[in-house]
Amino acid sequence: MSAPEGSRSYDAVIVGGGHNGLVAAAYLARAGRSVLVLERLGHTGGAAVSTRPFAGVDARLSRYSYLVSLLPAKIVQDLGLDVRLRTRGISSYTPVERAGHPTGLLVGGGERRTREAFARLTGGDREFDAWQRFYALTGRVARSVFPTLTEPLPTREELRRRVDDEEAWRALFEEPIGVAVEERFSDDLVRGVVLTDALIGTFADAHDPTLAQNRCFLYHVIGGGTGAWDVPVGGMGALTDALAGAARAAGAVIATGHEAVRIDTDGRNAEVSWRSADGEGVAAARHVLVGASPQALAALTGDTPPTPAEGAQLKVNMLLKRLPRLRDTSVDPREAFAGTFHIAEGYEQLAEAHARAAAGELPAVPPSEIYCHSLTDPTILGPDLVAEGHHTLTLFGLHAPARLFERDNDAVREELLRRTLAQLDAHLAEPLADCLATDADGRPCIEARSPLDLERDLGLPGGNIFHRALSWPWAQDGTGRWGVETRHPNVLLCGAGAVRGGGVSGVPGHNAAMAVLEQDVP
């Protein structure tokens, strides 16, 4: 929609057109409020976008955020979103070499098949039985906790009573997740597969006393009340395009290419100053919702910024001419890559990689995991690419804190990419490089992004995909009723840095909109 004109007044101005800002805009506009969304970039969606990163190639990759788990069905239904999520048939595959022979663990394809895979790897049923019991425990927690994300914040004790399971509470909320993993599992590979959900986007050890890893684990296993991670049909951009469409249809004005530069407020009325390629302006508002990071919010309001955040991941996008053959010939690559493909994510490997990175060194054996969205949703590829057998791969590397890239971002990124792909190649029967497609200029279809690249491109503080450390989903001092409140009564944080933020969820956007509507009750 066209840019805002002059100094118009709105019920709500939303800073940032990422998925959370769009959720808030849609809810408020549907409630009859006048809404302006100011988005710095030339498009909406923030990190949840689909792009064609390779010149002349008709492949739309979910470039920065990959999968959906935490988006409540309530939001989809409330906003009438035409969004389809497709379940992956395989949960994960983790290759490993044992006794000089390539093997691996395939999770999925039914209980019987998964039990047999565990038995082949570990020699018996013990690990699979422990797996079943542990994920039954996390499932009970998910069913209790997930519905609370779109409700006012409970207290810690209220949530504990809702969980009503002391074993689960101790394992997930009180002791480092490493204790639960080591108590329940014996096999190093199985332990590592479980632990990875505690480390995605979080630089921590299994026994970190801050329990940052526990909070990360919690958000990775509660989505939808099941913990399932689904592929958005059409790519992540299909979701954010649907949100932008819902907001516009309800009457919200979305101004892309408009950067908010200052927020002035007396607690009752506010003004948001913005600039664009065509000039500058001011929008008056009763409420301001900020979908950017807590650091950006502080910069806009002139408040003291919070502790700097730090991201810790390598993101790699690829397009292949074909899926590579595996050294483990017992599994079809179409199944191995259909779920989460774990690389160098044994329990001890994860600990060693963290220790090296914490000491300021690149991990010698960097852990990572791969997702092949085109196996689940081929619509992201042009018909010719599908017919020729092309596939997308997106790789998420762990334990790559931003501090490691500060001395020379380009050189360190390339070296980490080299080491990461070498770990993948160790499990392939052919080099990945031989499978890469080429773009219109003959260049291999591969791009890598460090935390510093994400900070530069998307404004993520330190490249942190959650904007800051994930929070427990309960009220603490200063969190307010919905977890979106700031020290300014009419300025709310609706981005991933809000309490219960992180991931593609829309939860902070929903909760900020609910807070506004509550404040507006006569």
Image (spheres, rainbow, N blue to C red):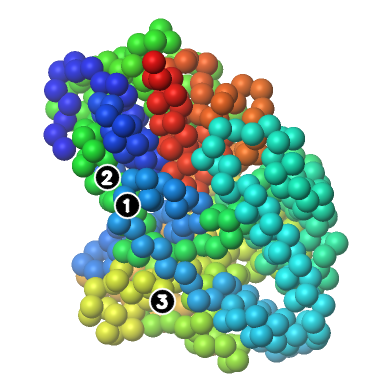
> As rendered, which of 331 and 515 lies closer to the eye?
515
Picture layout, residue 227 above or below residue 426: above
Residue density around tag 3, few if under 14, some if 14–19, many if 20 or more, within 10 Å:
some
Question: Which residue shows up at 24% across the image and 64% down it?
Answer: 55
Quarter where residue 60 is shown? bottom left
> As rendered, which of 314 and 88 lies closer to the eye?
88
In the image, what residue type sits under mark 3? Leu
Residue 119 position in % (x across, y down): 75, 85
Q: Secondary structure at mark 1?
A: loop
Residue density around tag 2, few if under 14, some if 14–19, many if 20 or more, within 10 Å:
many
Residue density around tag 1, few if under 14, some if 14–19, many if 20 or more, within 10 Å:
some
Question: Which residue shows up at 67% across the image and 67% down it?
Answer: 193
Q: Secondary structure at mark 3?
A: helix
Q: Is residue 446 left or right of residue 72?
A: left
Say the numbered circle drawn on residue 375. 3
Marks 2/3: CA–CA distance: 29 Å
Residue 48 position in % (x across, y down): 38, 50
In the image, what residue type sits under mark 1? Leu
Q: Earlier in the sequence, mark 3 or mark 1?
A: 1
Marks 1/2: CA–CA distance: 7 Å
**Residue occupied by mark 2:** 246
Picture layout, residue 389 above or below residue 175: below
Residue 155 position in % (x across, y down): 68, 32
In the image, what residue type sits under mark 2? Ala
Q: Is residue 240 visible?
A: yes
Marks 3/1: CA–CA distance: 24 Å
